[in-house]
Image (cartoon, grey):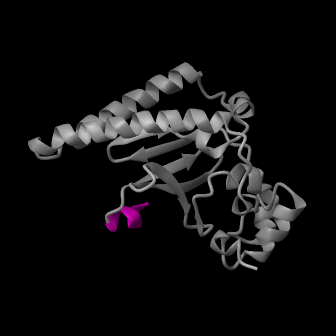
Amino acid sequence: TLVCRALGYEARLVHDWTDHVWTELYCDSLQRWVHADSCEAAFDTPLVYEQGWGKKLTYCLAYARDHAVDVTRRYSRKYPEVLTRRTQFSEQDLKRAMAALNGFAMDRAILELREDLQGPRREALERREAREAEELLGCERSSQAAKAEEQVGRTSGDAQWREQRGELGATEEARREALRLSESGLLLASAP
């Protein structure tokens, strides 16, 4: 995330409470946030953790310099199941906390801008926020199958370590692909 920001990309850190982190980049041409995991050499494969690794997700929270948002729905097609594991606090309390963090981050970042840039930046962030809220609700209702690159177990780390963590693959095929791609990552998943 830091490298992406240093290169001028709008990027945010996604923290998965089951112990992994990755980056999301804002893509102007797609008008959406796109998943990027440098450990896995993965790009735009948000379902890889649940569908490929077999992770039992709980909270996936994204943080940027000017906003914060719960993006768990983007990373799961089993959101009702995820909700049964989200027991740290009520969903209402989480929404209130994330809204407060988001408001604080947005206000603080906008005040650092020149006055003539403050209004347009706030409007842009609010438009993005509304589009993303709609997108995240659509993820929950989506019946779209996972892409081939999302049906691969974890490719980074020692195979025994991945096996112990239960991340080598949700299926036997995912395990085989994870082992095959251990040196190259997911970017080559579609290569013969």
Q: Report which quarter residue 147 is drawn in.
A: bottom right
As drawn, the residue found furthest toward the right would be 172
The image position of residue 64, as x and y in percent, is 38, 47
As drawn, the residue found furthest toward the left would be 115
Q: Residue at x 62, y 29 (%)?
A: 88
The answer to whether 163 is drawn above or below residue 83 in the figure is below
Q: Report which quarter residue 20 is drawn in.
A: bottom right
Q: Residue at x 40, y 36 (%)?
A: 129
Q: Residue at x 53, y 60 (%)?
A: 36
Q: Report which quarter residue 53 is drawn in.
A: bottom right
Judged by its main secondary structure, the magenta piece is: helix
Residue 136 within the segment the image draws in magenta: no
Q: Does 109 sit left or right of 93 as displayed? A: left
Q: Is residue 59 visible?
A: no
Q: How many marks?
A: 0
The answer to whether 86 is drawn above or below residue 92 in the figure is below
The image position of residue 113, as x and y in percent, is 16, 46
**Considering depth in this image, is 8 or 93 the residue closer to the camera?**
8
Q: Does 47 sit left or right of 3 as displayed? A: right
Range of residues picked out in magenta: 1-7
**Considering depth in this image, is 93 or 132 the residue closer to the camera?**
132
| Quarter of the figure that contains the C terminus | bottom right
Q: Residue at x 33, y 35 (%)?
A: 126
The image position of residue 177, as x and y in percent, is 80, 69
Q: Is residue 74 visible?
A: yes
The image position of residue 1, as x and y in percent, is 44, 60
